Each structure stands twice: as C-alpha cells, then as structure tokens.
Image (tube, grey):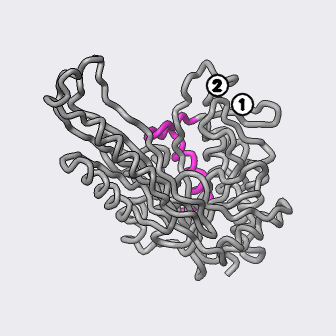
Amino acid sequence: MTLDPVALTQALIRCPSVTPADEGAQGLLADALAALGFTVTRLPFGHPPDGPVPNLFATRSDGAGPHFAFAGHSDVVPVGDHAGWSEDPFGAHVKDGFIVGRGAADMKGALAAMVAATARHLAKGPQAGGIRGRLSFIITGDEEGPATFGTNPMLDWLEANDLVPDLCLVGEPTSQAQLGDMMKIGRRGSLNAWITVNGAQGHVAYPHRAANPITPLLAMLTDLKARVLDTGNDWFQPSNLEVTDISVGNPATNVIPAQARARLNIRFNNEHTGAALEGWIRQVVAAHAASAHVEVKISGEAFLTEPGALSSLVSDAVQAATGRTPELSTTGGTSDARFIRRLCPVVEFGLPGQSMHKVDEHVAVADVEGLTVIYEGVLARALRG
C-alpha cells in the first residue's frame, strides 16, 4: 500500500480538530494504519471540561528487534479571526506550492509523513528492510490544551500493557529556516505561579486604617525578579522568570484595595527542579506576606536526551536526504516529549514551524514530501535489526 503524504495532510487539515475535538482526524489515521497491518487501539481518557480526549495507539511487530515509536498530536489551536485568513483555515488548499490550513505545520503534515514513510518502508519487504522489531504510533488529541488526558495516561497504559518503546521520535515542527536544520534533544521545564495578597480596604487619605496589598506584592515580585537563577550550561540557555500578569481591579482612585494578584512563569533548565523553584517562590512570598496564597502548576520538568544513538540515527537520515546536519537544540516551548522521556530516550524532529499557530499557517508541499523521505530513512536505521 502506498500513501500520498500531501493528500493525507490535506485530509487531516480538513478535520477541524480544535482541542479537544477530533472531528475524524484520528479515524483517518486509524484507517490508514490498520490497512498497513497495525493493531489500532482507541484510548479516550478524561471527563469535562477538559475531556474526554481522543487518543490513539497503533502497533505492529514483525519479529525480534527494537521497539521504535513515532509520537504526535492530531489536535490544533483555534483559528482566531477567520477574516484574517486568505484561505479557508480547514480547506487545505494548495497555494503557490504551500498547503494552507490550521495544523499544516503543527503538526498534521508530520503525522501524514510518518504514516506515508511507514507505508513506503513496509513496501520494500523484509529483504530490503521491513520492520525488524516493533513500530508504534502514540497519537494524542490534547497536546495543544491542558495535556491532562492525553500522552501521560497513554504512557501509563503502555507500561501496564508491556508496550514501552525503546526509542521515540516526536514530530513537532523543529526545523527553522530549512527542513532539517534543527532537532530538539531536550526542553526547558515550565512553572506557572499565581500569587494572591490580601490586605484591608480603606480610604487613601487614611492609610493607617488600611493595609495596601500592592506594597508587599511589588516587593516580593522585585525579589523574585532580582535573582539570577543560573547562567545556562552546555545545552540550555539561562533559566528565566517573567511576571505575566498583575491585577488589582480597583475602579476607584480614592480607595486602597483589599486584594492584589500576580502571575509569573519560569522557564527553567536542568539545573533546577520544579519542586525546588516552587519552594523558593513560597519562601520569598512568605517573607513579605505570611498570609498570602500561592498556587503553583508545574507543566513539565526540564530534560535532556544526551547526544547519542537516537540523535545520530535521526541526524544520519536528515543528512542523507537533505545534506544538512541538524543543530541539536533545547530551545522553544514544551511538547509531549516532556512526558515520554520518563519511559525512553526521545527527540523531536519535524517541519519548519515559522507559521505555526499563526493566521495562514502553511507548509511547503516539498517539505512534506522531504520529511517523508527523512522519516523513511529513520525507520530503515531504527528497525534494521
């Protein structure tokens, strides 16, 4: 069976799978993989308001050998203002050599390339390669959302069913200016904190009869921002704290407010843990306002897949197809690789992502076809026995 990665990309884009909706996207993948001899298991997890989330696991084993997995997500972010798009966001029209549509770059083009590469690899037969071991697909429907009922519970299910991969490639759009110029071998961790300081409301002319919560809030934020968390290391840029919101909501000019709130985010490297940073935040806050309330959510820890067999395998496939050697990087936001790394080595490699999440998101037809060639090369190297 052969598959056209461009046509499959278009078919996936035409499924308006805005998190956590699926709208048939995973059904397309399930049908294509089942036709290639994969055992497909649908794994819906969760409950409203963030679920249920559609998830899909597909696997095929052809004898003894390593277990390699492709991973990715079929959900997309909202399109925003439709009027800003030059084409129907879910029309998947080809314009000047580019497929335009929500999810084209992030990451339906990569999903299509994974499946098409698998079809090509299988068509060669066992003498020319085939699958010597196990090949799996781990596809979630909430990577762009809370990521609560997607990859993480799927990994628990894989552990319970003795299906843990040996190696995994996530198809996030890692390339920058050209297909193949960057691979992600790690990611920074991410922590959000919400701080609420309560005071006592009063007249601004009588401050001794009130307690202004803004004063300690500003002091604690100043202390938090003043700390140099680190200066970075060989693989990570310096960790960074940013205050992302300050809110008082006081409509009156002559009233000292009763409450003030702030929110901050820390993107941290592997010199820190989320728990240690949380403890530091709570300590600083308590020093200025013992009764202040702090809520912390750690959406992912920093991780690094040391350069080695997996990154070399992918780099070799990229170089063979494009002549480029991808830069090994840990920059950018978070992905589901932050969960997968607890089970096996994981890297991310995919399409150029300059347009992801933007109006007129697009991907070059040539890049979808090129990525398919690269993924086919990855399979030939990962499952050659």
Q: Quadrant of residue 104?
A: top right
Q: Residue at x 79, y 65 (%)?
A: 325
- Please state the extent of the stretch shown in magenta in the rendering: 15-38
| Rendered location of residue 39, percent (x, y) | 51, 62
| Left or right, 110 with reference to 266 | right
* Badge 1 or badge 2: first in the primary sequence: 2
The stretch drawn in magenta includes residue 360: no
User: Is disc 2 placed on a helix, strand or loop?
Assistant: loop
Q: On the image, numbered disc 2 is attached to which residue? A: 88
Query: What is the total number of numbered labels drawn onto the structure image?
Result: 2
Crowding at dot 2, Cα within 10 Å, few <14 / some 14-19 / many 20+, comes out as: some
Give 22 or 231, whichever is nearer the viewer.
Answer: 231
Residues at marks 1 and 2 touching, judged by CB atoms closer than 8 Å: yes
Three-letter amino acid code at the position of disc 2: Asp
Three-letter amino acid code at the position of disc 1: His
| Rendered location of residue 184, percent (x, y) | 63, 61
| Rendered location of residue 42, percent (x, y) | 44, 54
The stretch drawn in magenta includes residue 27: yes
Above or below residue 277? Residue 384 is: below
Please say whether residue 141 is visible from this viewpoint. no
Q: On the image, numbered disc 1 is attached to which residue? A: 93
